[in-house]
């Protein structure tokens, strides 16, 4: 009948065990007996009413006879003890000593969880006290078991110092353990009260690892110090910077003009003494190892607004005396704090309707993943991977199979627009390349490597040959191919590569051909996407076969974009430009202005100052044309850090455009490094800005010079101050002026790999009813 039937235990042993426990903890006697009574009832051993009736008989109590009086009443102390005695008898009869232990221990943990939840919700409680309580509760796990923490307790703790965003908590409460929260708090640096958050980037990293751990993914997380966002608040108060909160409401031109001074003020400001002391201890314990100081604002890596590349990560060599290293670290933190007021950050928040949000900045301090190779410190490889591939150069590549960008060295080279190349990997077909010939592969191979130069002061962009030479002893055969005398490329046969550096190309061919690494990335991406219920991207670094996931964010994607075929009946005279490479779905029914910087004009500029002037003019036009449908067309690589290869703009300079077109001409001897997968490209996605690479010298490509180069230039009317300095390079076509009665439209068909910009009647290009 009962669960105890068919099994034996020594009732006397159970009684001695239980009474010994109650004697040791007399204050818990009533609580323990109540828990045991509920357990015995839930398992069907007894019924609570039967126990109460036995107690009544034993004490000769009488139930109330007056129907107007309650049937139940509060037991007196002596009556409760009678009940406790009966419960002890029943527990001895039905339960083993081990079962009693488990029941009592579970009850104790529930009490501790409730106490922890109450504490975490109380205002004014120092974070050290919360941290101690969390650590004590996490220590209740026995023999490596997982604590089944009540959901309310986890949510209260998440809201206390991780994130108060409902979309994050929805995922986090299912995956984060109390041990994860304990891990964060043991590494948290904050003001004494500690009312801040770790920030979105930190929260995303910890959550990603919890999800991957549950999914059986073999990844590691960097040892991290979390500087909570309340430090940022105290920093501003200490230095009289609270008035800057109104800075974000200024016109973007004022924001742009004021930011250099704000950055200077932040760089010379003081940190709270408590924070300085805590960071000094951290640096002293870590020693002279390269560090990366990463932003972690409250808004970063959130659902729908990831802030990709908007805030900074700063790499430090961290060499020399403790005080020198401390000054270097504090300077990096101040630089990150100032970034809240940058034009890019303000433009991004304005674009996403987040301007009124009280943006605050947390900071993560992490060791740089990697090893020492001569003067260089870096991982073997790093990059970024996406669970959805928005760049498909072949019909065999499916969007849902994902994409990765791989580089040797630090991952900054994969996510920033550095004017260089990364290996693009379609994860389900990793050996397939967008380049067709060995010459094209060699041309599109990585030329520079981001490293921390520990001998010369920090972050550096080193020639790939020098870095590969320094890494030979550690092994580079998986990452390079050798260019032979006939112009062919072959992967190394053995583990040692002896070919000179000038014959080496970074291809990752051998690593990808084995297939294990792409499958590993795919498993990571699919696991995270399933947990987040939305596409994701991750940044990672691998060294000595250990894969570190350093960032994870929900990914905005254009996957739902509807296909619109390019019309076949457009007259040749009405075609403005066309493209047949790397085209995604997109449609602009109406374009009122075209801002064009012809690569030939830009390439003829002789000074860096002149090229910076072009970038400033683009920013001014972006402001002047806000609210009007316009597209930007320019050379090579928009936003490249190499000003020779493209207009050096930031998000704030282009955020109002409807499309960004990158023009590549064969006469320049290079093609644009694809934006796909960079922070730059993610900014375009989130801002709903279409992206299109254009190759005017391709056979059958349309490039209507009469319209593009001979139409009247409206620059002087829109930006009079820029006309004299940039009129010879920056053209602004007012479509109504250039083609009265017509409208300009752009159709991009990713499935057919066709795009066409053309003039058409107003009725066709009007918004649909």
Image: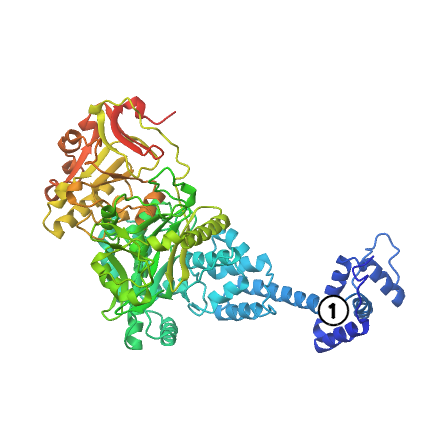
**762 up-or-down from 365: above or below:** above
Q: Residue at x 39, y 76 (%)?
A: 285
**Which color mode does the image show?**
rainbow
Q: Residue 657: x percent and y percent? A: 27, 40
Q: Residue at x 37, y 52 (%)?
A: 512
**99 up-or-down from 694: above or below:** below
**355 up-or-down from 33: above or below:** above
Q: Nearer the viewer, residue 152 or 386?
A: 386
Rendering quarter of residue 671: top left
Q: Residue at x 13, y 31 (%)?
A: 710
Rendering quarter of residue 24: bottom right
Q: Nearer the viewer, residue 751 or 332?
A: 751
Q: Residues within 10 Å of mark 1 (few under 14, many from 20)?
A: some
Q: Nearer the viewer, residue 295 or 501?
A: 501
Residue 451 appears in the rendering: yes
24 left or right of 621? right
Q: Secondary structure at mark 1?
A: helix
Residue 31 appears in the rendering: no
Q: Residue tagged by mark 1?
A: 30
Q: Residue at x 60, y 59 (%)?
A: 150
Q: Which quadrant of the figure contains the N terminus?
A: bottom right
Q: Which quadrant of the figure contains the C terminus?
A: top left
Q: Residue 212: x percent and y percent? A: 49, 56
């Amino acid at each position: 009948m009962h669960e105890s039937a068919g099994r034996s235990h020594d009732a006397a042993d159970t009684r001695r065990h239980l009474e010994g426990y109650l004697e040791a903890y007399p204050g818990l006697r009533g609580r323990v007996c109540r828990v045991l009574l509920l357990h015995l009832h839930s398992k069907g051993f007894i019924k609570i009413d039967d126990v109460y009736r036995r107690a009544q008989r034993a004490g000769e109590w009488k139930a109330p006879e007056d129907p107007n009086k309650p049937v139940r009443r509060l037991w007196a102390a002596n009556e409760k003890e009678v009940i406790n005695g009966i419960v002890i008898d029943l527990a001895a009869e039905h339960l083993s000593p081990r079962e009693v232990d488990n029941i009592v221990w579970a009850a104790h943990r529930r009490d501790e969880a409730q106490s922890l939840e109450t504490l975490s919700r109380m205002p004014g409680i120092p974070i050290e006290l919360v941290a101690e309580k969390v650590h004590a509760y996490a220590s209740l796990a026995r023999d490596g078991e997982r604590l089944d923490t009540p959901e309310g307790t986890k949510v209260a703790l998440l809201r206390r110092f991780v994130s108060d965003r409902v979309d994050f908590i929805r995922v986090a409460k299912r995956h984060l353990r109390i041990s994860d929260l304990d891990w964060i708090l043991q590494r948290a640096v904050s003001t004494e009260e500690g009312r801040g958050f770790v920030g979105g980037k930190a929260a995303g990293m910890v959550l990603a690892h919890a999800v991957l751990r549950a999914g059986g993914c073999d990844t590691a997380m960097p040892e991290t110090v979390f500087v909570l966002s309340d430090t940022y608040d105290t920093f501003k108060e200490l230095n009289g910077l609270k008035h800057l909160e109104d800075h974000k409401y200024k016109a973007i031109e004022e924001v742009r003009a004021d930011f250099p001074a704000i950055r200077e003020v932040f760089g010379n400001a003081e940190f709270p003494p408590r924070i300085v002391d805590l960071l000094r201890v951290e640096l002293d314990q870590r020693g002279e190892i390269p560090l990366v100081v990463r932003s972690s604002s409250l808004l970063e890596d959130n659902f729908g607004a990831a802030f990709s590349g908007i805030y900074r990560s700063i790499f430090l060599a961290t060499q020399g005396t403790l005080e020198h290293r401390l000054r270097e670290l504090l300077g990096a933190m101040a630089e990150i704090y100032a970034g809240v007021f940058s034009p890019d950050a303000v433009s991004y928040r304005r674009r996403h309707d987040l301007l009124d949000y009280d943006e605050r900045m947390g900071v993560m301090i992490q060791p740089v993943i990697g090893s020492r190779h001569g003067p260089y410190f870096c991982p073997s490889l790093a990059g970024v991977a996406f669970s959805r591939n928005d760049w498909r150069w072949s019909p065999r590549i499916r969007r849902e199979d994902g994409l990765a960008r791989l580089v040797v060295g630090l991952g900054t080279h994969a996510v920033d627009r550095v004017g260089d190349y990364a290996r693009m990997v379609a994860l389900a077909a990793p050996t397939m390349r967008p380049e067709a010939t060995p010459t094209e592969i060699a041309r599109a191979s990585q030329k520079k490597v981001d490293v921390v130069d520990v001998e010369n002061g920090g972050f550096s962009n080193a020639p790939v040959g020098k870095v590969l030479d320094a890494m030979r002893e550690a092994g580079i055969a998986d990452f390079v191919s050798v260019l032979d005398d006939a112009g062919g490329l072959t992967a190394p046969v053995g583990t040692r590569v002896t070919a000179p550096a000038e014959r080496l190309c970074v291809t990752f061919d051998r690593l990808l051909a084995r297939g294990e690494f792409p499958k590993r990335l795919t498993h990571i991406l699919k696991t995270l996407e399933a947990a987040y219920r939305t596409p994701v991207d991750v940044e990672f670094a691998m060294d000595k076969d250990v894969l570190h996931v350093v960032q994870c964010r929900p990914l905005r994607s254009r996957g739902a974009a509807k296909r619109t075929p390019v019309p076949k009946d457009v007259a040749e005279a009405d075609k403005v430009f066309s493209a047949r490479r790397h085209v995604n779905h997109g449609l602009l029914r109406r374009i009122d202005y075209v801002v064009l910087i012809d690569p030939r004009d830009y390439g003829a500029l002789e000074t860096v100052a002149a090229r910076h002037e072009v970038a400033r003019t683009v920013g001014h036009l972006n402001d002047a044309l806000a609210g009007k449908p316009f597209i930007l067309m320019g050379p090579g690589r928009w936003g490249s850090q190499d000003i020779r290869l493209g207009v050096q703009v930031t998000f704030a300079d282009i955020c109002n455009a409807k499309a960004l077109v990158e023009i590549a001409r064969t006469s320049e001897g290079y093609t644009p490094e694809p934006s796909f997968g960079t922070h730059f490209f993610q900014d375009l996605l989130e801002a709903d800005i279409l992206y299109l690479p254009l190759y005017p010298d391709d056979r059958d490509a349309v490039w209507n010079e009469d319209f593009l180069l001979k139409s009247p230039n409206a620059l002087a009317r829109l930006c009079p101050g820029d006309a004299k300095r940039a009129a010879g390079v920056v053209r602004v076509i007012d479509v109504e002026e250039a083609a009265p009665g017509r409208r300009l439209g752009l159709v991009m068909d990713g499935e057919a790999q066709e795009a066409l910009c053309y003039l058409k009647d107003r009725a066709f290009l009007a918004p649909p009813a």
